[in-house]
Amino acid sequence: MRREEIIQYALHFNHDYEQMAYALKFRPEVTPLPMVDAITYIDEDYPKSLFDLPNPPFVLFYLGNKELLTLPAISIIGSRKPSEYAIGTTVELVRNLKHRYVIVSGLAKGIDGIAHREALDDGYTIGILGCGIHEVYPKINEPLYKEMSTNHLILSEYPLHQPPLKHQFPFRNRLIAALSAKCVVTSAAKLSGTMHTVNAALALGKEVITIPYQMNDYFGEGCNQLILQGACVLTNVEDFAMI
């Protein structure tokens, strides 16, 4: 099967995973659509770590510098409504790590956006969307999106203007985990999208790193739970150099 055919199916079926699997097996005829920049699972530059997933994407649409996929990467994730403690820790972490790793996150509000912004100067960052590659969501991150789509990298398995549907974000989180050597959590409630990403990282055997919170801090309950489960704990700035 040619890569162009795979991309056409992704465009037609909005990379709905079941429809894509059906199309790739039975190869129905579809009306050709204008081609866009994409990496398919048969391409040499497709990230090999994605094959560790039970459901690797058939196509990755991208904007920016796809060569960043060849560099060591670390994910930094957390709440959309972080505390000042979480914000400060995230900024300090990225400042310490961006010269050694590409910073990967989900281009959401809160910790994701903070991690991406801090990596823009003197570093590189990859944002992974839960919507179409040309859909700016959330709108508050539009300036960040524009900067990253030019000088860094934005990825999505969903084409063009596929809207941000609720079920796509937990599914997106597996890509954040798979593309990163390690996963750092700076803020998380017990039940959250952040913890979905953590679970994906653990399933892949990735190291999970977090910071401690005071008791009964809602946005740190997930972090404290991870510590109880054996996650690596950062207790001071000197620890950052050991990641």
Image (cartoon, grey):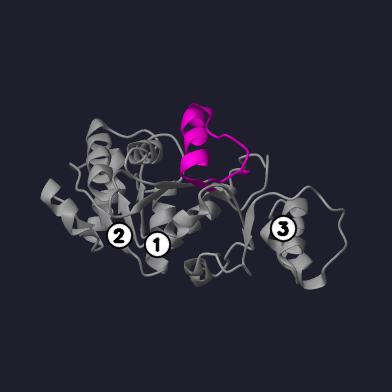
Q: Quadrant of residue 182?
A: bottom left
Asked whether the viewer can see residue 236, the reply is no
Q: Is residue 213 magenta?
A: no
Classed neighbour count for the residue bearing mark 2: other residues with Cα under 10 Å, few (<14), some (14–19), many (≥20): many
Amino acid type of the residue tagged 1 in the rendering: Ala
Residue denoted by label 2 = 208
The Cα atoms of the two marked residues, 3 and 1, are separated by 27 Å
The Cα atoms of the two marked residues, 2 and 1, are separated by 7 Å
Q: Is residue 131 magenta?
A: yes
Classed neighbour count for the residue bearing mark 1: other residues with Cα under 10 Å, few (<14), some (14–19), many (≥20): many
Element on which disc 2 rests: strand
Looking at the picture, how far across and down is residue 68, in whole percent? 45, 54
Of the residues tagged 3 and 2, which is closer to the observer? 3
Cβ–Cβ under 8 Å for marks 2 and 1: yes
Residue denoted by label 3 = 7
Q: What stretch is highlighted in magenta?
A: 129-154
Looking at the picture, how far across and down is residue 135, in whole percent? 62, 37
The earlier-in-sequence mark between 3 and 1 is 3
Amino acid type of the residue tagged 2 in the rendering: Val
Considering depth in this image, is 7 or 229 the residue closer to the camera?
A: 7
The Cα atoms of the two marked residues, 3 and 2, are separated by 34 Å
Give the numbered dot on residue 201: 1
Looking at the picture, how far across and down is residue 27, in whole percent? 82, 68
Looking at the picture, how far across and down is residue 210, in whole percent? 25, 52
Quarter in which the C terminus is drawn: bottom left
Element on which disc 1 rests: helix
Cβ–Cβ under 8 Å for marks 3 and 1: no
Residue 189 relative to residue 67: left or right: left
Residue 93 relative to residue 117: left or right: left
Element on which disc 3 rests: helix
Quarter in which the N terminus is drawn: bottom right
Amino acid type of the residue tagged 3 in the rendering: Ile
